Image: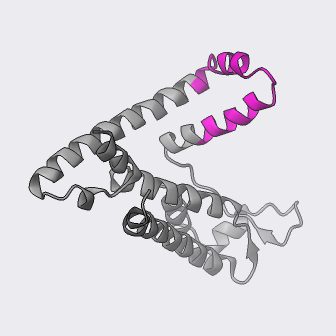
């Protein structure tokens, strides 16, 4: 990736993801009313959203932080405190985590499967066995369908946009389109 691509595509998208994270934390701070709250999922989801933003651009609208913000927008402080597990005796407030889009869930599950395969010592055999599980097969199908669809959309979008204006580089809005441009 060139510095121009990083400046024009990656940086604005990472910034957009950081703003979503700040929106989430503002709402959490408001609901927590001075109490500490866990940010583990938030930081992880912000990083995932940044990768989605510059990897796929606006073509893939699903994000992980958006459902979290929407969930908390529908809750009151009393709702949050009522869901807090009083048995833990912790001073850190745990907010509920909204479900994420099935494509993103399948992608995260694939990443978790890599760890399980790595510790076996027999990766080929482990992949074969893990690949037989129905949940893994469904996840792979969902993820693969999404990726094929995104590549086809990026190719078509690039083809139609470059007919309008002569500069190819102006239409590169994601890593995926960048790959399509340099693969043609």
Q: Is residue 76 visible?
A: yes
Quadrant of residue 36 within the rendered picture: bottom right
Q: Is residue 61 visible?
A: no
**130 drawn magenta:** yes
Q: Which residues are magenta?
A: 108-136
Residue 140, position as x, y percentages in the image = 52, 28
Residue 17, position as x, y percentages in the image = 49, 66
Residue 52, position as x, y percentages in the image = 47, 53
Residue at (84% x, 63% y) in the render: 86
Depth check: give the residue in front, 7 or 100.
7
Q: Is residue 132 above or below residue 46?
A: above
**70 drawn magenta:** no
Residue 70, position as x, y percentages in the image = 49, 63
| On-image quarter of the C terminus | top left
User: Which of the colour schemes (rainbow, by chain, secondary structure, one colour) is used?
Assistant: one colour
Residue 124 in the figure: left or right of residue 151: right
Magenta residues, dominant SS class? helix
């Amino acid at each position: 990736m060139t510095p121009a691509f990083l400046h024009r595509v990656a940086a604005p998208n990472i910034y957009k993801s950081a703003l979503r994270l700040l929106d989430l934390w503002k709402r959490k701070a408001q609901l927590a009313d001075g109490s500490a709250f866990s940010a583990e999922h938030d930081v992880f989801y912000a990083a995932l959203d940044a990768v989605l933003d510059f990897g796929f651009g606006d073509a893939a609208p699903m994000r992980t932080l958006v459902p979290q913000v929407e969930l908390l927008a529908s809750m009151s402080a009393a709702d949050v405190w009522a869901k807090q597990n009083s048995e833990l005796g912790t001073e850190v407030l745990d907010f509920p985590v909204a479900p994420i889009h099935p494509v993103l869930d399948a992608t995260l599950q694939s990443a978790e499967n890599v760890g399980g395969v790595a510790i076996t010592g027999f990766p080929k055999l482990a992949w074969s066995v893990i690949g037989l599980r129905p949940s893994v097969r469904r996840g792979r199908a969902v993820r693969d369908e999404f990726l094929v669809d995104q590549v086809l959309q990026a190719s078509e979008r690039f083809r139609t946009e470059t007919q309008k204006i002569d500069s190819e580089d102006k239409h590169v809005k994601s890593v995926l389109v960048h790959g399509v441009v340099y693969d043609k």
